[in-house]
Amino acid sequence: MTNNITLMIGGTQGEGIVSTGNILIKTLSRLGYFTYGFRNFSSRIKGGHTNYIIEINTKEVLAYGDSLDILIAFDMESIEVNIDRLKEGGLVIYDSIINPENYFVRRDLGFLSFPFTDIAKKYGSCIMKNTSLLGLLGRLLNIHSQNIKDTVEETYKKKGQDILSKNFTVLDKTYEEPIENEEIKTRYNLNTSISEKRASMIGNEAIAFGALMAGCRFMAAYPITPASEIMEYLSEKLPDYGGIVLQTEDEIAAITMSLGSSYAGSRAMTASSGPGISLMMEGIGLAGMAEIPIVIVDVQRVGPSTGLPTKHEQSDIEFLYHGAHGEIPLIIVTPYSVEECFYQSIQAFNLAEKYQCPVIILSDLALGLSRQTIKSLDKNKITIDRGKIASGENLEETKLDFRRFDFTSDNISQRTLPGFLEGIHKVTGLEHSIIGTPNNYPDNRKKMMDKRLNKIRKLESQNNIDIFGTTNSSLLVLSIGSNYGIIKKVVEDYNLPVAYGAFKMIKPLPVKQLKELTEKYSKILIVENNARGQLASIIKQKLPCHDKFHNLLKYDGTPFKLAEIKSKIEEMI
Amino acid sequence: MTTVKKYQNDVTPTWCPGCGDFSVLRSLQAAAARLNLDNHNLMTVSGIGCSGRISGYLKTYGFHSIHGRALPIAQGIKLTNPELTVIAMGGDGDGFAIGTNHTIHAMKRNIDITYIVMNNQIYGLTKGHTSPLSEKNFVTKSTPYGHIEDPLRPGLLALASGSGFVAQGFSAYQEQLIDIIIKAINHKGFSFINVFSPCVTFNKVNTYQWFREHLVNLDEDSDHDKTSFQNAMNKYIETGGLFTGILYENKQMEYHERLSKKHKTPIIYQNLDISESFDKLIEDFI
């Protein structure tokens, strides 16, 4: 019996490994277990090695272990590439159609041959070897076959009754297939968890779901790995609520069309990754200048240029922080868990309309694509604050245009929407007057710049770093995005006596809170996935005590291993 | 009676005296007056360049956007509030250089907006550089030895891209232009008007006089069947693109008509708070 298993399913891309992993995650989550799945994939549809690592735990888990308990291989390459990742005493389960006898010399490992393909072919079709695999895992983890059947049914019901019943037969036959090694049958049985039906989700879905609940009714976007799931979810759901998702000709159209929609009164968004965000930068500048609310999601992948499209990195931080030519008001929120993706997405729409400026939700591939069990989302936290939109009926009659960009005490002006009888005004990317007409007088220019830049300045004094762990430690480990989950696992698994924090917003940088933290902690380690320590560099621009800051960087396209973070922390304590 | 005055504001245009754009502005105001459009329901979106300033010279909601992007912004506005009359405007650089991709896809998409290109075959605001619509051998500051490329043919591109309304006007033929703009606004779907709007400062070849000598009037051509795609193509080739009037008009299903019935209520009137749906929506993930 066990509380925690790290397993990997390996095979050839395009053979159903992802859906298999997803079914397992869904089944386990429904039974109250916590899971975290990480996909290793390449930029092709069929062929090439792919694997899906799934961490299973009776308690919350936001990262996967460095070494595997079980490796399940459909092909020889999966064994060759991954055998060294197994723990001592780990188990290789392989499809009986392959013969890995060369590896039997690894006496520290167990080997189990299982007729996945044979059962699938005999009772269904070859592709159902995935279902057979689910059946075997169900047996090893001690999950009732009916639980797997329920998820399989929901996933494959569109394929028709015949396919479904064949899948069920394959499952039943897998459960009946004799396994000689008695010890293996119980070794991986999961201890019971707190029984609660939990949801499983990827960060991209959580952002899209949050956007829907926040009242987003328009999205224009161009497909890109690893952000497409956001538009895919909204494409399916928005029509039910009268909203529109439009796939544009490019990312330039995506941002500008979304801006048009937002200007006309919708809550609008777009989503992309580095290459697309690069194309959007001019539109983001227009949103800043013309004070149009807009939400832009950047699910970061490896750059520069096309980089490694299917690999993880956090290297758009400085680009976005300093981004758009000229100087604009811009807010960057940084969710660090799937749950936070949901809440921050809602918050992003409120911030965009409150401050009438672009808001970027900065995510990363590991957060955006890793399917995991989540804690239940609190619907009471859903609020919609549309900021200073004037009421169309109560506007005073005026011979002049509406003062859309009027100077106010909080630097935020009233918005009117096209169609409002007395709200007529102009909008331009040129420097402009209070009614939006071009204006190049130095006095006006300076006042308008100050108005736009100062309206978000008070966010600097908000607490936007969540702090966890041993807060009376001398070391604080800071991170953004998916690194929070890995650090949390390291600190908890190894009982490390350190504090760790995750940013929720990096622009405006929470300067006040950072100052307090530098006074409280003698060392601050900033963990990030890029080559130059971009987040650290931004923090150092604002804070004097540079000798307190240390960096742990990784930029090989893979997320941090637990051991890499553990050894750095131990070195610093 | 509604007059053009209703759509005038007190901003003085930055255009050179004699610029063809004055006529486009006045024609649009006159068309709006004859259609008796509400100022507050008229939305003009423009690009960058001399022509781009036009959205600032009308007593309507006006969005002076960025170079080449008037069309996606205009489409976003129309999709959100279909009750607005949305007019996108810009120069030949906006429409056929930096924004060509948007032009083609806006025509393909067929959202009910009117797109007026103020075509002077030169980049005026950069002080005289070649345009994708400049004729071959045209001498400019960026082509001092003469332009070695052939120009794009906007009408053919519009037909090939699926625009259901393709017309051309000339700044000097204001009555015809007003009539075309009215018909374009009334056309349910994307409508494209290429207006020859001479640049009196930098284009010394394609002048008012030059156009008067070269343009033929399709509205006076009784053989011209503007509902025939084949005929429109032939007519364009036959005239070398040098004509005014409506080349092609054929109703195609507009974008909103293609959307499901659920979109009957415009986005602008949708209820944003759907918290009662939360439990149903989260079920997908459990």
Image (cartoon, rainbow, N blue to C red):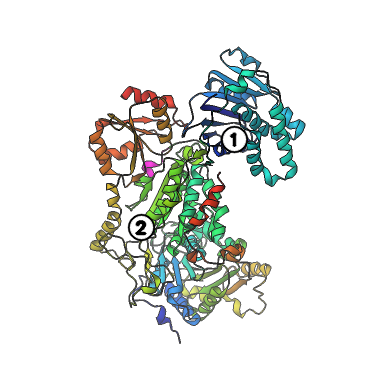
Q: Amino acid at mark 2?
A: Lys
Q: Nearer the viewer, mark 2 or mark 1?
A: 1
Q: Is residue B189 magenta?
A: no
The stretch of residues the image draws in magenta is A314-319
Q: Residue A264's image quarter?
A: bottom left
Q: Residue B285's image quarter?
A: top right
Q: Where, quadrant-wise, is the N terminus of chain A in this rendering? A: top right
Q: Where, quadrant-wise, is the C terminus of chain A in this rendering? A: top left
Disc 1 target residue: A24
Q: Amino acid at mark 1?
A: Leu
Q: Secondary structure at mark 2?
A: helix
The residue sitting at 64% across, 73% down in the picture is B226
Asked if marks 2 and 1 touch (Cβ < 8 Å), the reply is: no
Quick one: B113 or A160, which is closer to the camera? A160
Quick one: A527 or A182, which is closer to the camera? A182
The residue sitting at 46% across, 46% down in the picture is A377
